[in-house]
Amino acid sequence: MFAATFDWFHLLVILCALAGILILVAKVARQAEAEARARKTGSFSLPDSFDLIAHLKRQYAFSEKTFGPGERTVAALDHIRKELKEIESDPHDVVEWADLLLIAFDGAMRAGFTPAQICEALTNKLTINENRTWPDWRTVAPGKAIEHIREADERSPEVAASRDQSGPAECPVVTREEQDLEALATEAQDLTDDLVVVAAALRRLSEKRTALIRGQAAELARLRAAASSSA
């Protein structure tokens, strides 16, 4: 009888442990489902900061492994033309714009530029554009590109200074260590909450087991006493 109680108790303990594992698996599955839905809709939730250099390193490793080494400039331009047509057909699909950016970044890296150089070029080019002279956008026909006024920029010392700027520009790259630590802390708290639930269930089972054993011991003592008195 005690052996049967022991086996029953351990079976319940195993079931509770499996329940805890299932809770964790369900949480991971929900997270994977959310990520898959985000990939499909282009609705990823990102922190306020983004490490572009780390992203470009990750992208280049994927690109070289998947598409092979080499410049592939002609292939990249062909792909860009196709993506431009897809953007024209649906300019409100952010994934198509992302495709265009990825191909452009890949082409630049395959042309020999490092992630840091690409980031530097982005910041330098924006500085140049900020210092350029631009026409009133209301005077430009809709659907036409707005170009800077070259004659005015040739006489502008600010544009010349930004164009001739030497040395690497400060790249606005912020690491995601704090965001990763916060995410880990949140995940750890969720796991702790799940373990608390499992521990409470195990405690209740232990209390029931103790009560059952005591009841069986009392019943066995009563039976022995009855057997002794009848003898």
Image: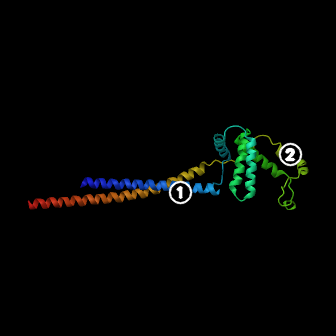
* Residue toward you, 187 or 107: 107
Residue at the location (24% across, 55% down)? 1
Q: Which mark is residue 160?
A: 2
* Residue toward you, 75 or 130: 75
Asked whether the viewer can see residue 52, the reply is: yes
Q: Which residue is mark 1?
A: 30
Q: Amino acid at mark 2?
A: Ala
Q: Position of residue 169 (x, y in %)?
A: 75, 44
Q: Position of residue 65 (x, y in %)?
A: 63, 40
Quarter of the image where one finds residue 217: bottom left
Q: Residues within 10 Å of mark 2 (few under 14, many from 20)?
A: some
Q: Residues within 10 Å of mark 1 (few under 14, many from 20)?
A: few
Q: Position of residue 203 (x, y in %)?
A: 36, 57
Does dot 1 land on a helix, a strand or a loop? helix
Q: In the visual, does 222 lie left or right of 68? A: left
Residue at the location (53% across, 55% down)? 186
Q: Position of residue 225 (x, y in %)?
A: 14, 60
Q: Amino acid at mark 1?
A: Arg
Name which of mark 2 and mark 1 comes first in the sequence: 1
> Is 102 rendered above or below residue 110?
below
- Marks 2 and 1, how far apart in space? 54 Å
Q: In the visual, does 37 lie left or right of 20? A: right
Q: How many marks?
A: 2
Identity of the residue furthest to the left in this view: 231
Quadrant of the drawing holding the C terminus? bottom left
Of tags 2 and 1, which is closer to the observer?
A: 1
